[in-house]
Image (tube, coloured by chain):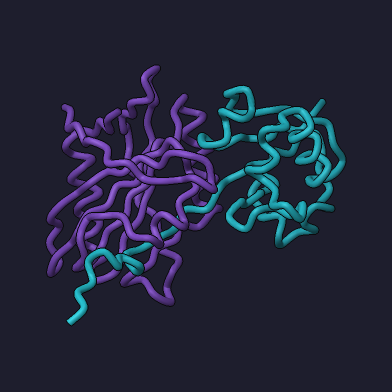
Amino acid sequence: MALKIPNALLDQLREHGEQTYPHECCGVLVGDFDDADNKTVKSVIACGNTRTDSPENRYHIDPAQLIRIQREAALAGQDIVGFYHSHPDWPAKWSSTDLDEAHWTGCSYVITSVENGKAVLTNSFLLLGEEQSKHFEDESIEVVE
Amino acid sequence: MPIKVLIPTPLRPYAGKQPSVEVTAKTVGEALNNLVTQYPDLRKHLFAEDGKLRSFVNVYLNDEDIRYLAKDATPAKETDTITIVPSVAGGRVGCIDFLQID
């Protein structure tokens, strides 16, 4: 399985991480699932980080904003296919906190490392399993036109 | 006319793969109970063993979080939409794999 994303949208989510540095950015990936559960991102929606108490190492998306995004995606015949956030001055790898607080099975969790204000690596992780057995698997990012 | 319940992507496999389900109810709590009666596999994903909504499951009546209304007892009518949305959060804190111990 792969996450397909146009280059411009990949740039967009990476630039968001640079804009919010040294704080974590976060947002939603909207698009389509195909029959093989590959995902194609059609839009990247930047969200505010509500973790104002610890924005340099935590993020949280306002559920009210998620609901609006989910509703608008449905009207366009699309779905929420994943989420993204940044790790300021930290590797682009999921943390135990990322796993503990991940609940959207089947969706992609994209993480960009931002070092000294510059986006470096972007990786995607697919959340699988049920709540008690959930885990991330590495997922390839396929840049499309 | 029943109330529409919008099902998020991760819960659709337990709800007949449908993006929305219609239930008949007078309150949000009744709607959720009718939903899990109709789709029993959903129950453990929405409710903890004590019967309360799981902490990471947000339930909205239209644009309002039911925690700030009357929770389960929030009245619901036919024109309302109930939306279930798991929380989205995380962060680099906890990246113990990369900590170096001198």
In this view, A98 is above or below A51: above
Question: Can you give x and y, in whole percent of width and height, for residue B13 in the image?
Answer: 56, 28
Which shade is chain B?
A: cyan
Q: Residue at 18% of width from left, 39% of height from top?
A: A8
Question: Can you give x and y, in whole percent of width and height, for residue A105 in the image?
Answer: 47, 39
Q: Residue furthest bottom?
A: B102
- Kindly indicate the quadrant of the structure image that contains residue A29: top left
- Kindly indicate the quadrant of the structure image that contains residue B31: top right
In this view, A32 is above or below A119: above
Q: Residue at 21% of width from left, 65% of height from top?
A: A90
Q: Residue furthest top?
A: A35
Which shade is chain A?
A: purple
Q: Residue at 57% of width from left, 35% of height from top?
A: B11
Residue A116 shown left or right of residue B62 in the figure: left
Question: Can you give x and y, in whole percent of width and height, for residue B76 in the image?
Answer: 81, 43
Name the foreground residue: B53 vs A4.
B53
Question: Can you give x and y, in whole percent of width and height, for residue A20 in the image?
Answer: 26, 65
Q: Residue at 43% of width from left, 77% of height from top?
A: A53
Residue B31 shown left or right of residue A128 in the figure: right
Q: Which residue lies furthest to the right in this view?
A: B26
